[in-house]
Image (spheres, helix red, strand yellow):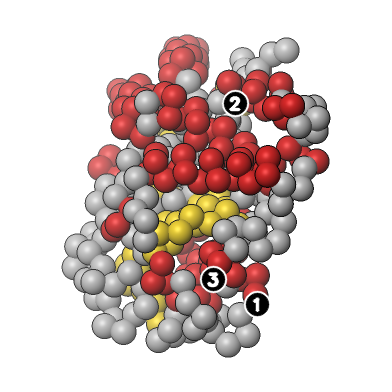
Amino acid sequence: MSRVYNFSAGPAVLPEEVLRETAEEMLDYKGSGMSVMEMSHRSKVYDNIIKTAESDLRELMNIPDNYKVLFLQGGASQQFAMIPMNLMKNKKAAYIVTGQWAKKAYQEAQLFGEAVKVASSEDETFSYIPDCSDLDIPEDADYVYICENNTIYGTKYKELPNTKGHTLVADVSSCFLSEPVDVTKYGIIYGGVQKNIGPAGVVIVIIREDLITEDTLPGTPTMLKYKTHADAESLYNTPPAYGIYVCGKVFQWIKKMGGLEVMKQRNEEKAKILYDFLDQSKLFQGTVKKEDRSLMNVPFVTGDKELDAKFVKEAEAAGFVNLKGHRSVGGMRASIYNAMPKEGVEKLVAFMKKFEEEN
Ligand SMILES: *Cc1c(COP(=O)(O)O)cnc(C)c1O
């Protein structure tokens, strides 16, 4: 067996320990005589898996009692519709457009009401986070929407926007559990788990209870109402059962590592190794404004497309895979999520140094 250093933006690297444990439990989960894949989601054994996953997540993120945790499907992209369908009581919402994912959410919201773009960084290919301290947010906006970590462009909000009293909704897909958060500042925190938590197929929505109502837009399907899933504790229909089980394992891994403070420290250390190298390199440059740099996704370029391609190819041959940048940005991107060991980043930087000397 040989494992590579996988810098994919998602689906992405998972902790090796978690993969080993799930492999061990594959044929017979704790004496049940079956795999978690084969078990009823209404069984006692599975109930314990999903309840433990939820309580571990609550503990890790310090989620207050007046928030529900929902394990859903449909990807983060389905939330682009579910959020307006459930929250747009006044049919108006404010969107801050800091990348492709925020833009898609903004465009989707236009299907349901008036989505007002209150700030954007598209003028400079989303390479920064706009000043959000005093935005012109419509009085009657139902919420303010952000994508907190921009997976493709490698930027992150270091300070949440001043929503002027409006509910904040955040897509945290690519920074979920990367550092502590104050849940009380948000109405909804959500993300697809395939970036920093688990296998594709699960979306976690953390939602303040007062936002869960019957009063959704007319025609909202049962499956797209938060209330349906909240009332049934994520078991209205068959949930992505195996994926939730793996997420639960990752929560336990993070707890064992020391929780989100430790994750943050580790992530800062790893990102610093890469950014420090980029800042002094004569060949490679980071592509985003320094103050807004993400700890999770690090895009960089050489400035020469052919050399970029050569780098990606040679890196892959050396065991550093999925470093090609998103098709909309080009260059390279190293995603260094929680499960990427520090050693993986150190070795990548050593490889980049060597490439720089040779080219
Ligand atoms: C990957 C990603 C998405 C899309 O997720 P899907 O689960 O594929 O729908 C949305 N937002 C962010 C920030 C992402 O990184």
Is residue 50 depicted above or below 334 in this figure?
below
Percent coordinates x, y for residue 227 in the rendering: 54, 71
Give whichever of 107, 171 is nearer the camera.
171
Is residue 267 depicted above or below 202 in this figure?
above
Percent coordinates x, y for residue 127 in the rendering: 37, 50
Q: Does the beta carbon at disc 2 come under 8 Å from ligand 1?
A: no
Percent coordinates x, y for residue 315 in the rendering: 58, 21
Residue at figure coordinates x 65%, y 77% from the top left: 221
Image mark for residue 73 = none
Which residue position holds label 3? Answer: 227
Residue at figure coordinates x 63%, y 46% from the top left: 47
Left or right: residue 88 versus residue 266 is right
In space, the residues marked 3 and 1 are separated at their CA atoms by: 11 Å
In space, the residues marked 2 and 3 are separated at their CA atoms by: 32 Å
Image mark for residue 18 = 2
Which residue position holds label 1? Answer: 221
Left or right: residue 69 versus residue 239 is left
Query: Can residue 40 be seen from the camera position used here?
Result: yes
Q: Earlier in the sequence, mark 1 or mark 2?
A: 2
Callout 3: helix, strand or loop? helix
Callout 1: helix, strand or loop? loop
Is residue 115 depicted above or below 155 in this figure?
below
